[in-house]
Image: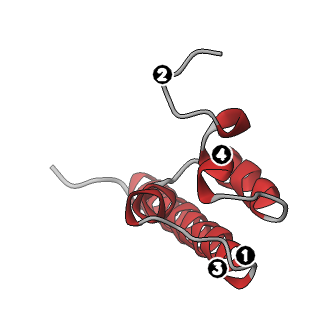
């Protein structure tokens, strides 16, 4: 059966919103990397890939904030600069 016009319009809006969110995430990820590289902070390939692949706006926003003052790329993506799974 054919979808109704309102259902098609709703689907189009949903897809557009998803596209906008994906584009915004990619832009924020690029900003995180730009800030780090501009500040002369080395970004290992695995961390660069992790940042570029992230789609969570809240996480990316936090990373961007930390990128401004972080001494290392690991400090940006790991809470308190601790590697995942390590205990203090």
Residue 64 lies left or right of residue 74; in this view the side is: right
Disc 1 crowd rating (10 Å Cα; few below 14, some 14-19, many 20+) is: some
Q: Nearer the viewer, residue 4 or 64?
A: 64
Circles 4 and 2, Cβ within 8 Å, touching? The answer is no
Residue 54 lies left or right of residue 32; in this view the side is: left
Q: Which residue is mark 4?
A: 59
Give the colour scheme of this rendering: secondary structure
Q: Earlier in the sequence, mark 2 or mark 1?
A: 1
Image label count: 4
Q: Quadrant of the C terminus?
A: top right
Q: Which residue is mark 1?
A: 35
Q: CA distance from mark 1 to mark 4?
A: 16 Å
Write the residue at 39% across / 59% down.
Answer: 8
Q: Which residue is mark 2?
A: 85
Circles 2 and 1, Cβ within 8 Å, touching? The answer is no
Q: Earlier in the sequence, mark 4 or mark 2?
A: 4
Circles 1 and 3, Cβ within 8 Å, touching? The answer is yes
Q: Nearer the viewer, residue 73 or 25?
A: 73
Q: CA distance from mark 2 to mark 1?
A: 27 Å
On screen, 85 above or below 46?
A: above
Q: Residue 37 got which mark?
A: 3
Write the residue at 74% across / 54% down.
Answer: 61
Q: Nearer the viewer, mark 1 or mark 4?
A: 1
Disc 4 crowd rating (10 Å Cα; few below 14, some 14-19, many 20+) is: some
């Amino acid at each position: 059966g054919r979808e109704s016009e309102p259902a098609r319009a709703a689907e189009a809006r949903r897809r557009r919103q998803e596209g906008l969110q994906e584009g915004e995430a990619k832009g924020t990820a690029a900003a995180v990397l730009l800030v780090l590289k501009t500040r002369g902070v080395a970004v290992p390939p695995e961390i660069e890939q992790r940042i570029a692949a992230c789609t969570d706006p809240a996480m990316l926003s936090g990373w961007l904030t930390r990128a401004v003052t972080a001494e290392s790329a690991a400090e940006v993506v790991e809470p308190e600069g601790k590697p995942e799974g390590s205990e203090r």
